[in-house]
Image (cartoon, rainbow, N blue to C red):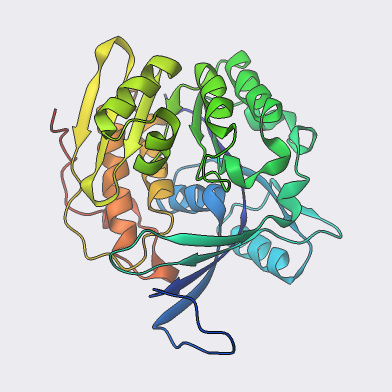
């Protein structure tokens, strides 16, 4: 049985600059190797990766009717993904500028635009009516934070669907109530996908295995802690434990790697109810994506690294 997949979250424009190791001096103009512009946001990244894998799905989100939004909408339509995208008159599109460099964690500058006012009331009822519903880019959706997002998760479960949740980084650096806000939502989440710094911030645990254990107790479903080039650790119901290494790759563009992992996982879960297999495919997709040029990054199934599924280490 093929399961239906819906992706809901922040659709926006991404500007990727690399390498950026410092900001230019006032009045200066630093020359760097690459600046790429692409339709993205966490939800856009997941959806484009799913499209590359030829997974039928629907993408729900909003952009403004400015030049950026019209271009993003046109690019998504070209990929067959624009039918459910709202283009909101008189609003600006969300834009993130990603600053990348070898040996340092990525940093972002973001203007939310229309995402500041995108609320639960703007989300069509059918968005939560699927077998697998991923809500992603939570902290890039100010208008959906808290009760709005929680209600979407609950609506999905009421329809009999499984919920997949990825928050992204709290723009307040977890100094406020964001940890309690997220932890309160986890009982309504079937698969939670934090990266290592997010899991550490939510739990206070420096060790990702301990953080995964803590979050799984709060969630009750699957918790997948993404460890970048080190792969992932996962905890599931009934004591399930997985650790998966990533293959060595020369990284060209790491922004959206976690979104690509989610897409690979969803692609497998749409066909097989096997988390070990799904996460192995997720790691393969993410590793393939980061090793490719920014504007030709999403692989088909035939282009994934290697030929056999990656085996879990434990």
Which quarter of the rendered picture does the C terminus lie within?
top left
Q: Nearer the viewer, residue 205 or 281?
A: 205
The quadrant holding residue 72 is bottom right
Q: Position of residue 252 (x, y in %)?
A: 32, 68
Answer with left or right where residue 146 lies relative to residue 284. right
Q: Position of residue 287 (x, y in %)?
A: 27, 54
In the displayed orientation, state which residue is furthest to the right: 90
Answer with left or right where residue 219 lies relative to residue 12. left
The quadrant holding residue 280 is top left
Whether residue 220 appears in this view of the structure is no
Q: Nearer the viewer, residue 272 or 177?
A: 177
Instruction: Relative to 236, say whether 267 is above or below.
Output: below
Q: Residue at x 60, y 52 (%)?
A: 81
The quadrant holding residue 104 is bottom left
Q: Position of residue 301 (x, y in %)?
A: 31, 50
Which quarter of the rendered picture does the N terminus lie within?
top left
Answer with left or right where residue 147 lies relative to residue 275. right
Instruction: Relative to 251, say whether 131 is above or below.
Output: above
Instruction: Relative to 28, say whether 161 is above or below.
Output: above
In the displayed orientation, state which residue is furthest to the top: 238
Q: Residue at x 42, y 59 (%)?
A: 255
Whether residue 155 appears in this view of the structure is yes
Instruction: Relative to 157, say whether 128 is above or below.
Output: below
How many numbered marks appear?
Answer: 0
Q: Position of residue 185 (x, y in %)?
A: 56, 22
Q: Nearer the viewer, residue 16 or 131?
A: 16
């Amino acid at each position: 049985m093929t399961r239906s997949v819906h992706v809901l979250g922040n659709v926006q424009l991404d500007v990727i600059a690399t390498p950026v190791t410092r900001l230019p001096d006032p009045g200066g103009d630093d020359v760097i190797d690459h600046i790429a512009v692409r339709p993205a946001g966490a939800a856009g990244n997941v959806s484009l990766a799913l499209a590359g894998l030829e997974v039928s799905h629907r993408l729900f989100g909003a952009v403004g009717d400015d030049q950026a939004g019209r271009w993003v909408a046109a690019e998504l339509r070209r990929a067959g993904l624009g039918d459910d995208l709202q283009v909101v008159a008189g609003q600006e599109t969300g834009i993130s500028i990603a600053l990348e460099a070898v040996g340092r964690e990525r940093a972002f500058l973001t203007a939310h635009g229309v995402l500041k006012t995108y609320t639960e009331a703007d989300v069509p009822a059918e968005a939560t009516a699927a077998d697998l519903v991923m809500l992603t880019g939570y902290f890039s959706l100010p208008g959906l934070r808290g009760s709005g997002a929680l209600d979407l998760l609950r609506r999905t479960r009421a329809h009999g669907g499984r919920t997949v949740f990825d928050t992204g980084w709290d723009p307040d650096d977890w100094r406020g109530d964001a940890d309690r806000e997220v932890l309160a939502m986890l009982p309504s989440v079937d698969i939670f996908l934090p990266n290592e710094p997010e899991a550490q911030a939510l739990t206070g645990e420096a060790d990702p295995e301990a953080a995964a254990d803590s979050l799984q107790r709060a969630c009750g479903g699957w918790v997948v802690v993404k460890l970048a080039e080190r792969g992932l650790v996962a905890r599931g119901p009934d004591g399930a434990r997985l650790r998966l290494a990533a293959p060595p790759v020369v990284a060209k563009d790491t922004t959206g790697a976690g979104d690509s992992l989610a897409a690979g996982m969803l692609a497998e879960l749409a066909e097989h109810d096997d988390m070990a297999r799904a996460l192995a495919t997720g790691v393969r997709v993410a590793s393939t994506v980061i090793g490719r040029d920014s504007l030709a990054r999403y692989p088909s199934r035939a282009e994934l690294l290697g030929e056999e599924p990656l085996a879990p280490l434990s």
